[in-house]
Amino acid sequence: MTHTPQDPIVVLGGGPAGMASALALRTAGHDVVILERYREARPAGNILNLWPPPIKALGLMGVDTTDLGAPCHSTFRNARGDIRADVQIPDDVVTAYGGGFIGMLRPDLYRRMLAALPDGMLQTNQEVVGIRDTGGEVVLTLKDGTMRRTPLLIGADGIDSIVRTHLWGVSPKREHRLQIIGGYTFDDVPAAEKGEAIIAHTRTVQGSYTSIRSDGRDGFQWWVLEACDPDAPAPADLRGHARRGARGFGAPLTTLIDHTTDDHVQRWVIRDRKPLKAWSRGRITLAGDAAHATSPYAAYGAGMSIGDGYFLGKLLAGVDLHDTAAVTAALTEYDRIRIPHTTMQVQQAYILGKVFHHAPAVLRPLRDAVMDHTSMLQKQIGERSPREIDAQLDEMGAGITAPA
Ligand SMILES: Cc1cc2nc3c(=O)[nH]c(=O)nc-3n(C[C@H](O)[C@H](O)[C@H](O)COP(=O)(O)OP(=O)(O)OC[C@H]3O[C@@H](n4cnc5c(N)ncnc54)[C@H](O)[C@@H]3O)c2cc1C
């Protein structure tokens, strides 16, 4: 049994990685479906920021990014507000992509991506439970027993990816022993700085906020990140717990928390998986958290997921899916381009979490003196991030070219 020309590429999972992969592969001229296990593609969470590369990628795959969020200039600060690192994105990049770090609500990103999908591309209530790569095609078994055949499977099925397990075996989750509680408000809080993303640290807690924009309304999102016992029950009063954690920062962070209603507050325990050395094998590859689950310390997991999708489209444009060698070559190039970049982000986010929240108490004053009085954080984050963003934008090129 080999796949027929009418069998579409299957993207497993309707999250940011899956929708981006499908849109980019369609832009490249391929027929694609997304199989999503739930009855709708729904965002797990509320708050989100995107850097310019995913904004560029979204635009080039047909997603309307106009006024998608609030453009923010980002600084890392100590609890007194002194700047430790200033992420200066060049003006031309800010102008071209509507800002440096764009603060938004996750459901808004979903709505824009869903609106760009052609009818029928997203197929819901389709949980895949089995995968077999025969060499000439991939055969999928769904929970209801039906079979699907595809020339190419993209596993965009999140941190608990069955595609990743099929390809590379079981690997344990890496426990960061951190939790993040975050929320948002559209109340006017005059003391909060508009157009800024402020990422601040006390000796043990990160307390941050950024502007957001949603449906033409301006507001703020905030989060409080701290060490936790991942096996302990979640605090009963999330907002109260975050408020206590934010005491070391004072206003405006505490005021933003006071102005947030309980239904706009969520908590996540932070886990990732150690980066893989290879993603693709045969006619199967990975994208998004399935490939590189990342701590929110990077605030880049969704951004990288969208980037993965973009490069899949770019590298598979013009590839005859019947030609196994050509498919393999495109996926090998995809691994070559994406793995070093995403691995570096995953590891950096993991290390930052350790440095800021798990340093021995005796070393914390020394750590903070280094952060406050040397250019270390400015070099590591303030200068490196704009360089990386520039390199990503360059590597993306002018777009995805479908064959004539
Ligand atoms: C608190 C928090 C804050 C964050 N902030 C940011 C940020 O500011 N910026 C940023 O870029 N990133 C951020 N991230 C990271 C970002 O949320 C993730 O990296 C991103 O959602 C991953 O997208 P994905 O499509 O790979 O996976 P998911 O969003 O997990 O989507 C996977 C999809 O696959 C489906 N699926 C799974 N298994 C199957 C199956 N067997 N059959 C069919 N369907 C299946 C699922 O139902 C789901 O819809 C944050 C994460 C957290 C927790």
Image (tube, grey):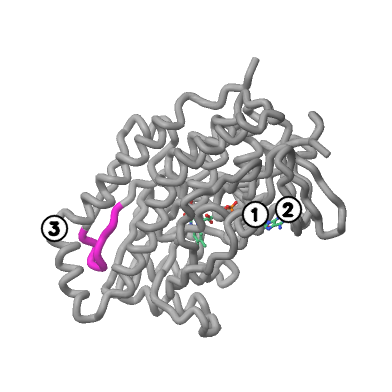
Residue 155 visible in rendering: yes
Mark 2 Cα-neighbour bin, 10 Å: few <14, some 14–19, many ≥20: many
Residue 163's label in the rendered image is: 1
Q: Is residue 263 above or below residue 323?
A: below
Give the residue displayed 52% in from the left and 71% down from the top.
Answer: 267
Ligand 1 shows up in the quarter that is bottom right
Residue 65 visible in rendering: no
**Label 2: which residue?**
131
Element assignment for label 1? helix
Please tell me which of labels 2 and 1 falls first in the chain. Answer: 2
Magenta stretch contains residue 29: no
Residue 374's label in the rendered image is: 3
Q: Quadrant of residue 246?
A: bottom left
Kind of residue at disc 1: Val
Mark 2 vs ligand 1: CB below 8 Å: no
Mark 3 vs ligand 1: CB below 8 Å: no
Task: Check the image and name the residue furthest to the left.
Answer: 373
